[in-house]
Image: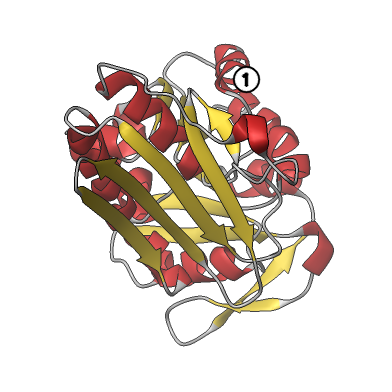
Amino acid sequence: MIDVVVTGAAGKVGREVVKAIGQTSDMRVVAAVDPGQAGMPVDDGKGGEIQCVADLGVSIAETNPAVMVDFTHPSAVEGNLRAALAAGVDCVVGTTGLSEGSLRALVSDAPDGTCLFMAPNFAIGAVLMMRFAAQAARYMPHVEILELHHDQKADAPSGTALLTAEIIANARQTVPSAPGRETELAEGARGALVDNVTVHSVRLPGLVAHQEVLFGGQGQTLSIRHDSIDRTSFTPGVLMAVEAVGARSGLVIGLDALMEG
């Protein structure tokens, strides 16, 4: 049985994570932490409820979890990771906003054998979208990324878009020009350059998490798109990571690393 503490447990994704873990036979939520929602009940996945608590440090000391799952906010995740990693608790993180350098520094101070797993997107379909984009970029180097998220998302571009741009940059053999920046009528109209890949971010209510990778070539276009239409799309990947981190150590980035075995 894998004991798990969930931070951000009253949030939209956190609630689904608590419920999904409770519905498994080999893991359980031993603490649901959400400082802004202490006392709020969340569905435990077994037909009952678990009350949110405010203090992560106290929860770790009292429950001795094997894994912390964090879906909080860029302003909170670093403190949560420091507390968990210092206690030797493996971490599964879906909160974006910390650089790879910051993540490496955090896990370097943890006891030997502790794992910090971070994925910008836990939807398995999103991982496949990035794999297919990498394949396409080898043959169609003209590409732009359009990512669309709900209007409460704290960072832009999304972590998924940043990783996709990096993957494309590593895969394609030439870097074509991205014309139009010199004649923008409004600054930013052509998007942001990430690893020499143009990225456009949309933030609107009603959206969840969506990304389209658009390729252009002579007389043709190719569109590779993934849509998370419900936050339950993230839970299979979270469960995969919770089961996997105990056999790993150090920093691991991306669900793709687990899907490769």
Identify whether 238 is placed above or below 102.
Answer: below
Q: Nearer the viewer, residue 61 or 181?
A: 181
Q: In the rendered image, is residue 97 in sight?
A: yes
* Occupied quadrant, residue 76: top right
Q: Looking at the rendering, in which quadrant would you find the C terminus?
A: top left
Q: Residue at x 70, y 67 (%)?
A: 52
Q: Say few, some or many: other residues with alpha carbon within 10 Å of mark 1 (under 14 / 14 to 19 / 20 or more).
A: some
Q: Nearer the viewer, residue 147 or 181?
A: 181
Identify whether 172 is placed above or below 130.
Answer: above
User: What is the residue that sits farthest to the bottom in this orientation?
Assistant: 47
Left or right: 3 as drawn, with respect to 152:
left
Q: Residue at x 44, y 74 (%)?
A: 230
Left or right: 39 as drawn, with respect to 174:
right
Q: Nearer the viewer, residue 250 or 257?
A: 257
Q: Position of residue 214 (x, y in %)?
A: 34, 48
Q: Secondary structure at mark 1?
A: helix
Amino acid tagged 1? Leu
* Occupied quadrant, residue 174: top left
Name the residue beneath numbered marker 1.
Answer: 106
Q: Position of residue 94 (x, y in %)?
A: 52, 47
The colour scheme is secondary structure
